[in-house]
Image (cartoon, helix red, strand yellow):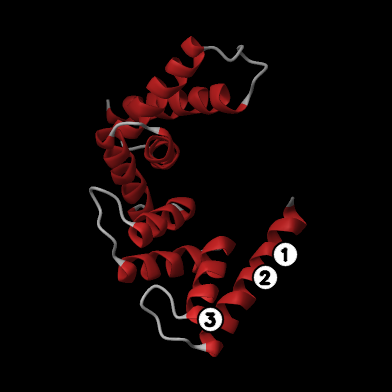
Amino acid sequence: MPQASSLFTRLEFRLAEQLFHTRWLLPRSPRTQRLTMQLFKRCAEAGHPDALSIYGHMLFHRSQSPHDKARGARYVLEAAQAGDIKSQYQAARIHEHGCVQYPRREDYAVTLYARAAQSGHFLAAERLARAYRLGELGLTIDSEQAAYWQGLADRQSQAELATA
């Protein structure tokens, strides 16, 4: 039965994605938005990596309550540990700036930025380049490291533009 549950979760996630990204499927209404959020929530609670990333990001950045923000941060960190590149970048930002549940940890932020950058996230590479250039995130100023990360960011940005 785990396969059926997993298949059902994947189908629910696809539906939630469609509702979230396409306006023509159903009109934007509070009811449609609640349904979309409920689907994302169920998929995230089932451990679906993309749902953890998307729903966690939405909770962390759009929720009003500290409890929901903390749950969003936890989901983002789970997705980052599972290898989601966008979540690694978001988790690095959470650790860089801190929040109620996760205090500022610049060393964690640097590690997560580096993972995301090595996996192709050009904003993470740009952040590391700036950090090395200005001595931020607890790093010492290092022009060689800054040039390395900036070069990586530039290559990734060009590759992204070429595929768009």
Residue toward you, 30 or 15: 30
The answer to which image quadrant residue 120 occupies is bottom right
Q: Kindly indicate whether the residue at mark 1 contacts the one at mark 3 (C-beta within 8 angstroms).
A: no
Are the residues tagged 1 and 2 within 8 Å (C-beta)?
Answer: yes
Residue type at mark 3 is Arg
Mark 1 residue crowding within 10 angstroms, few (<14) / some (14–19) / many (20+): few
| Residue ID for mark 2 | 154
| Quarter that holds the N terminus | top left
Image position, residue 36 (x, y; %): 46, 21
Q: Nearer the viewer, mark 3 or mark 2?
A: 3
Q: Nearer the viewer, residue 64 or 153?
A: 64
Query: Of circles 3 and 1, which is in front?
Result: 3
The residue where tag 3 is placed is 133
Residue 45's place in the image compared with 159, above or below, is above
Q: Is residue 117 above or below residue 53?
A: below
In three-dimensional space, the C-alpha distance between marks 3 and 2, rounded to whole angstroms, equals: 16 Å
Give whichever of discs 3 and 2 has the lower sequence position: 3
- The residue at which mark 1 appears reads as 158
Q: For the residues labelled 3 and 2, say whether their Cβ atoms are less than 8 Å apart.
A: no
Where does the image place residue 17, in percent across and percent down from the top left?
53, 28
Residues under labels 3 and 1: Cα distance?
22 Å
Query: In this picture, is 90 found above or below 122?
Result: above
Is there any visible trace of residue 121 in the rendered image? no
Residue in the foreground of this view, choosing between 35 and 104: 104
